[in-house]
Image (cartoon, rainbow, N blue to C red):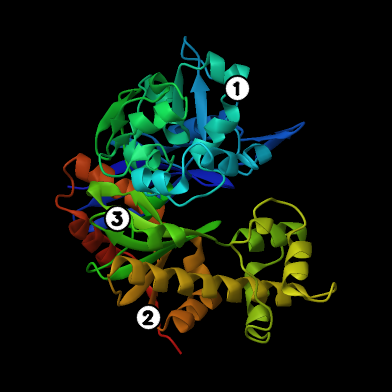
Amino acid sequence: MSKEFAAVDLGASSGRVMVGRVGPSEIKLTEAHRFHNVPVKTQKTLYWDILGLYRGVLEGLKRAGQVESIGIDSWAVDYGLLDATGELLGNPVHYRDARTDGVPERLAQKIADERLYEITGLQKLPFNTIYQLAAAKDTPQYAAAKQLLLVPDLLAYWLTGETGAEYTNASTTELVDVRTRDWSAPLIDQLGLRPSLFPAIRHPGSVIGDFGGTRVVAVGSHDTASAVVGVPAAGAHFAYISCGTWSLVGLELPAPVLSAASRAANFTNEGGVDGTIRYLRNVMGLWPLQECMREWGSPDIVELLRAASREKPFGAVVDLDDPVFLPPGDMAGRLIKAAGLPADASHAVLTRCIVDSLALAHKRAIEQAQELSGRHVDAVHIVGGGARNELLCQLTADACGLPVLAGPVEATALGNLLVQARAAGVIEGDLTALRSVLRATQQIVRYEPR
């Protein structure tokens, strides 16, 4: 028997509520509501408009109508702080805010990077929650805080009144022990943080609480965790690229890789659904192209990519992981400078530079992941918005020398829905069983390497 579920999926630029009818051999998606996610800068700080997002969630759930359950996923690392009465102490700060500038270097004097990696297995990124908290520790807001909730857990709390920390998202904070899958008390103590801030860990498939008579169920609340569930792979020997604002490039493994070489390569071991490890690198994905298009007045993406496909291959490439490309604003100017292009470089040339550079970044990450983990891959799955980008998919196949299977675009929402459906007893089995439903129901485009 098929049932309907609601997936709340929040991305860096928009949010939506998707309704999925799911059965043992059926998944049908409809969009109930889509809304903008626009950060707000006040004086020196960049914030998320969390109340605007919650309003969009409520409107989406209203339009979704009666469903079996609700699951929420979002980006990682950002959080809200609650006071003793359970009220939010200000908007969550955006991970692109400058407050963590220099913090990783200062924290490394207190606890060595090697020790951090040994405990958490996480890639060192300047916006990880650990660095955000270190930057906030001496503020009046932190002093008044009684509870920390990551973004999807905060929204679930407002819906149900229940607090907690879903495992896949908590694993990205750099405060969870990768072996025990729980908060690292020794690490939290060494950093001088209050252990009472961190709520109990819960796992995908558990019931969080009730919203107006409908169950709210924990899913892989880190959107990449849900996206990896939504990868329609037939076996274990695959690489995935969850491609949108970021490209999350990696492998699904049964255990973390904690070698010195893995740390040096800046690979991360994030928690996945069913106790898996998402062994991956964060690669600057389509963010530079998104920013350029915003600066250019939002030209037609299809025409832009068609023009880019006619430009000289690899005429100019940049290292997209350079932190210079992280902040918003004047992206085209920074690309021109980094690539050594003329100041009047066309939109097509800059687009080709971005896509070529991203394909090479995908190749590097996949080759390193295989070498460091000892697992070879036979194919690369690209899911998310990047699966629509035919030029990027073909160039990634060419660069990697492997077939690329593109789709589904809605992998995150599908992974969210599949975990809910399994919790409701509509689908049974492990991740292989869930993915078999995707292969039977979703359109997948194959790109052979040239």
Query: What's the amino acid at mark 1?
Result: Asp
Mark 1 vs 2, N-terminal side: 1
Q: What element carries label 2?
A: loop
Q: Residue 355, image x and y in percent?
A: 60, 73
Report crowding for label 2: few under 14, some 14 to 19, many 20 or more residues within 10 A (C-alpha): many
Is 31 displayed left or right of 307 in the figure?
Answer: left
Image quarter for residue 315? Answer: bottom right
> Which quadrant of the structure image shows residue 27?
bottom left
Q: What element carries label 1?
A: loop
Residue picked out by circle 1: 138
Q: Residue furthest bottom?
A: 450
Q: Which of 11 and 77 is in front in this view?
A: 77
Q: What element carries label 3?
A: strand
The amino acid marked with disc number 2 is: Pro
Horizontal arrangement in the rendering, residue 329 relative to residue 87 (left or right): right
Instruction: Point out the tag, 2 or 3, that comes first from the N-terminus.
Output: 3
- CA–CA distance in space, label 1 to label 2: 51 Å
Q: State if disc 2 and disc 1 touch (CB < 8 Å).
A: no
Work out whether 77 lies above or below 165.
below
- In the picture of the structure, the residue carrying the numbered disc 3 is 27
Numbered tag placed on residue 403 in the rendering: 2
User: Residue 124 or 160: which is nearer the viewer?
Assistant: 124
Residue 275 image offset from top left, x and y in percent: 23, 47
The type of residue carrying mark 3 is: Ile
Of labels 1 and 2, the one closer to you: 1
How many discs mark residues in the rendered view? 3
